[in-house]
Structures are given as structure tokens and as C-alpha cells.
Image (spheres, rainbow, N blue to C red):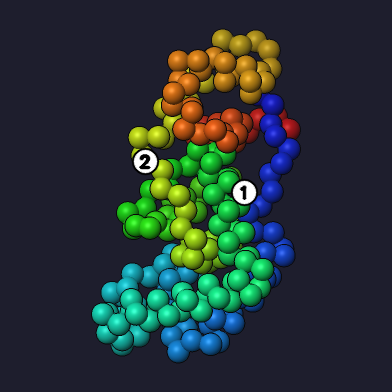
Amino acid sequence: MIEPRNTRQPIVNDTLCSTTQEVIQLVRSNTLYPFLLDAKFGDAENGPMPDTDTALNHDTPLVSIGGKWARIMSTLAQTDQQHGNPLAQIAQRANDVMAQAAIVNRHKRRPPLYSESTLRTLIELDFVAPDHSRLIRAAGHLFPPPIIPPSHGINSIIADIAAHMARSHEPQRPAQVFESLHRRQDTLANWPQLDLPLFIRRVADIRPDE
């Protein structure tokens, strides 16, 4: 089995959680449209609500939601900056994990948000607690994740890794596995921060021996 890394830090730590919740609550208290925050950010059990449903449920014109949300976002950006940029920090930490796990964030919106499938993956990898989904979504609205072309996905190389591991009789270091993928270097070059044990865990649900 390949060697695991020992740096598995959650995206939202206690400090970021507390500060970000304070930022969101301040914005929520200072807006005329708190229902929009709830609809856009969702919670641990529910994803974002479509604007059409928001308009219907809160008896507000659909055409007005864009303008209302723009004003909320302006306030959110200012409040985040005044409190040490916790949303920016969460977004950066989420982006780092995505780069390490080779997660292609498939979201049709441009600029994109963190998709619900990306959030589920981050939760499955233990980088995000379900209760923190709302905070990740908030960070994505203010600091959209990078756009990675679907063609850069590397899930297909898991078959090569599995074949190499099946031929190996001794524990393998990540460098050895990378070396076995010499024919895939052009593909791997798209993921310079790749954490191989984390990638294998994401794609094959195999956890290296601790």
C-alpha cells in the first residue's frame, strides 16, 4: 500500500467556522431579504433553492432577485473583509483540497459555484462536515472555484494504478507509483498539487494503512 500523508486538515476549522457564521449572521441581520441568504446557501440537509422556487415561496418577483442578491453580495464582501476574510480563506482551502484530490468541479454556472457533487465528495473525504456545507456555498458565491476543463480529469488513470499495485509485492511510495505512470505525464501535469493517496481514496475508496 502507498504511504499516506499525515496532513488532513479540515477546510473549515473552529476559528473559520465561528468567524464566518458571524459574518453571515451580520449580513443576514442587515439585509431586507434574509430569505435569499437561506435560499442561496442552503443547509446540511438541503442544497440551494432555485430562484424560481424562491420567488414563488416568498412572493417576490423573479426578475428582482438578481438585483437584491447583488446588494447582499456587496455587503457580504465588505463584511468578510472587515472580519479578516474568513470566506476567502475557506475558498482557498477548498480549492487546495480540490487540486490535491483532482476534483473537477462540474457546475454549469459561470462563474461557477461549488457543485453539490463536489461538496459531497469533500464530505466523503472528511474535509468538510455536513454542517459546514452552508459556509462552503457562501465562500463559493464570493470567491468562485477555478474552472477546470472536464478534459483534464484523471479518474481514468486509476486502472493503471490498480494494475501497478497488483504487480507489486512490497509497499509502494507515491514516487514509485508516479514513476509507473510515465505514459500519463502529460495528463498528470494538469494536477501539479496531486496527492496520490488522497486521489486513490477518492476514486477507488481505498484508504492507505495508517
Q: Residue at x 62, y 66 (%)?
A: 85
Residue 76 position, x and y percent, is 52, 75
Q: Residue at x 33, y 69 (%)?
A: 50
User: Cβ–Cβ below 8 Å for labels 2 and 1?
Assistant: no
Q: Nearer the viewer, residue 134 or 187?
A: 187
| Measured Cα–Cα span from mark 2 to mark 1 | 25 Å
Residue 136 seen in this snapshot: yes
Vertical placement of residue 97 versus 201, above or below: below
Q: Residue at x 60, y 71 (%)?
A: 81
Secondary structure of the residue carrying tag 2 is loop
Residue 71 position, x and y percent, is 43, 80
Task: Place residue 82 in its image quadrant.
Answer: bottom right
**Residue placed under numbered mark 2 in the picture:** 149
Mark 1 burial class by Cα count in 10 Å: few <14, some 14-19, many 20+: some
First-in-chain label (2 vs 1): 1
**Residue placed under numbered mark 1 in the picture:** 126
Vertical placement of residue 133 versus 192, above or below: below
Secondary structure of the residue carrying tag 1 is loop
Q: Nearer the viewer, residue 78 or 174?
A: 78
The amino acid pointed to by label 2 is Pro
Task: Place residue 180 in its image quadrant.
Answer: top right
Residue 197 position, x and y percent, is 61, 31
Front disc: 2 or 1: 2
Residue 190 position, x and y percent, is 46, 32
